[in-house]
Amino acid sequence: MIQLTDIRKTFNPGTINEKLALDGVSLTMKEGDFVTVIGGNGAGKSTMLNAIAGTWPVDDGSIVIDGINVTGLSEYKRAKYLGRVFQDPMTGTAASMGIDENLALAARRGRMRGLGWGIHKKEREEYRKLLAELNLGLEDRMTSKVGLLSGGQRQALTLLMATLQKPKVLLLDEHTAALDPKTAKTVLETTQQIVSEHQLTTMMVTHNMRDAIHYGNRIIMMNEGRIILDISGVEKKNLTIEDLLHKFEEVSGEEFTNDQAILSK
Amino acid sequence: MDITALISALPGNVAQGLIWGIMALGVFLTFKILDFADLTVDGSLATGGAVTVMLILSGWSAPAALVAAFAAGILAGLATGLLHTLLGIPDILSGILLQLALYSINLNIMGGAANMALPVSQYQLLVSLRYIVPTIMVVAGIVIVLISVMYWYFGTEQGSAIRATGTNPAMSRAQGINIDLMKVIALALSNGMVAFSGGLLSQYQGFSDINMGRGAIVIGLAAVIIGEVIGNALFGKRMNFIIRLLFVVFGAILYYIAIGVVLWLRMPTNNLKMFTAIIVALFLAVPHLKDKANNSFAKAGRRGESIHDSAN
C-alpha cells in the first residue's frame, strides 16, 4: 500500500546547521495497517511524515503509494492520495471559512476546481450526518466560522476532512499533542472509530508511549533518522512501556531521553 | 464657505467614488481575500487609462476599449503573480517591480507622452464629468454586475480555493489546491478590475496621465478599510460577503465625499495625498484603539489600584 525505500534527507546541507534528518528509512505498510510511530525529539518522526506528504523533495529514495511512485510529485499533487491531520489545530482548517465550506474543500481534494458550485445542497445534508457522528454538536453550527471552534473540535473536524474522501494513507502528526488529556482521548477514540470503520492505512506519530501501544497493530520506533524497532502482531499487543524503554536502550546503546514520552504512563 | 458649493459638488464625488470603488474591489480581492499586499495597482490603473484612451483615439468603441483595458490589467497581474510564484520574489517587491516596469510600458502605450487628452466632445464615451448623472447610473450598473459576478465566483470551487489559499496556504496544499495557480489567478483578476477602473476614470476625466495611479493602492485600501469599519459598526455579525463588497464601494464613495469636504474647506490641493494617508492611518487605527480602550494596562492598573486601596 505504501512503500518507502531508503529515504534520505539532510536539512541545510553545507552549513553549520546541517542536520541529517532521515538516514535511509525503509518501510512497507500493508493495506489497513495502523502504525504508531514513537521516538525522541529530533528522531525523524514528523520528518518521515512530511517526506511522504511531500512538504519538500527527498534527497534520495523512493515513495510508492498504492503502486504509484509519488517521489517526484509536489505536495498538492500527492494530496489526492493522502489525508493529513497536523499537531497544531490551526494548521488543518481554514479559520475564516465555515465548517461546511471546509468540508466541501476537503471533499474536492485531488480534483480539478472549476466553476461549479463550491458546495451543493445535497453535500450539506451528508455533512450534517457525518458531523452528528462526532457528538460535538457541530451539525447545528454548520455555517459557523471554523475560527470559533476549540482546538479539539478543530482536530475532530480536520480528521473528518482528511477521511471524507477515503485516503490511501492517513497521516496523523501528533494530532492530539496540543490538546488537554480529556479532549486528546476523545479525539483518539474518534480516530480509532474512523480508521476501523473505513479500514484506513494509517500512520500516527505520538509522544505518548501508552497511546502508541494501545492503538494500531504495529509500532515503530525511530532514532537519529532511522527506524530502530518494528514490532507488530501479538508481540505488539503484549508490550509494556518498560519493554519499549528497555528495547530502545538495547538497540541504540543509549538511554531514551524524552520525559514527555516516559512520564505519560 | 458656501454650503451649496459643497452640495453641488456631491454628485461628482459620488461618481468618482463609484469608479474608484471598482478599483477598491480589486484591492479587496488581493488584500483581504488572498492576503497579498499587491502594489501593482498603482501601475495597472494607469495602464487601463492609457490603453482605453489610445484605443478610443484610434477608433475603438468605449466598451471595447474597456475590455482591452481589463485584458491589459490581467497581463500585469499575471506578471506580478509569476514573479512571486515562479521566481520566489516576495509579494510586496513583486508588485513594486511591476509598478516600476509599468511606468515605462504606460509611456510607450501613450506614444511617449506623459498624458493624452480624450475630449468627450469628439468621442462617444461611456462616462464623463460633463454628464454626471448618467455617469453615476452607468457606473452603478457596472458595480452591481461586478459585485454579483464576484459573489458568484467566490462561491464556486475555484473561488473557494482562492479564499482557502488566502486563509491557510498549508491547509490548502494538504487539500490538493495548487496555491501558486490560485495566487496568479487572483492577482490577474484583481489587476484586470483595477485597469478597467482606470479605463473608466480616464474617460470620466477626459484624459489619461502617466501619474494617474500614484497612490492608488492607498485610496483602494482607504475604501476597503473605511467600508469594513462602517459595515462592522452597522451590521456587526450579520456582515455577509455581499454586504462586505457593497461596503467596499461605499467606502470609496465616502472617501471621495471626504475629499470633497476638504477641498470645500479650501485646503491646498498639494496636501491631498497627505490627507489621504491620514484618513487611512486613522481607519487602520480604529480597531486597534477600540481594542486597547477595552483592554489596556492603564485600565487594569486603575482597577488593581482600587482593589489594593480598598484592601488596605
Image (spheres, rainbow, N blue to C red):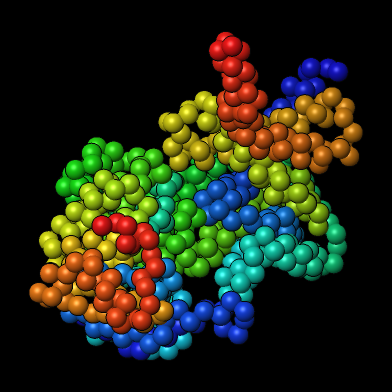
Q: Residue at x 46, y 56 (%)?
A: B168
**From the viewer's perspective, is residue B141 above or below residue B152?**
above
Residue A149: x and y in percent read: 35, 42
Left or right: residue A154 versus residue B86 is left
Q: Which image quadrant: the C terminus of chain A?
A: bottom left
**From the viewer's perspective, is residue B245 above or below residue A235?**
above
Q: Which image quadrant: the N terminus of chain A?
A: bottom left
Q: Residue furthest left?
A: A234
Q: Residue at x 72, y 59 (%)?
A: B43
Q: Residue at x 54, y 65 (%)?
A: B184
| Figure quadrant of residue B308 | top right
**From the viewer's perspective, is residue B52 above or below residue B311?**
below
Residue B263: x and y in percent read: 82, 30
Q: Residue at x 86, y 62 (%)?
A: B113
Q: Closest to the observer: B294 or B46? A: B294
Q: Closest to the observer: B160 or B166? A: B166
Residue B91: x and y in percent read: 63, 62
Residue A213: x and y in percent read: 20, 65
**From the viewer's perspective, is residue B1 above or below residue A34?**
above
Left or right: residue A81 versus residue B271 is left
Q: Is residue B127 visible?
A: no
| Figure quadrant of residue B274 | top right
Q: Closest to the observer: A31 or B282? A: A31
Numbered marks: total? 0
Q: Is residue B220 visible?
A: yes
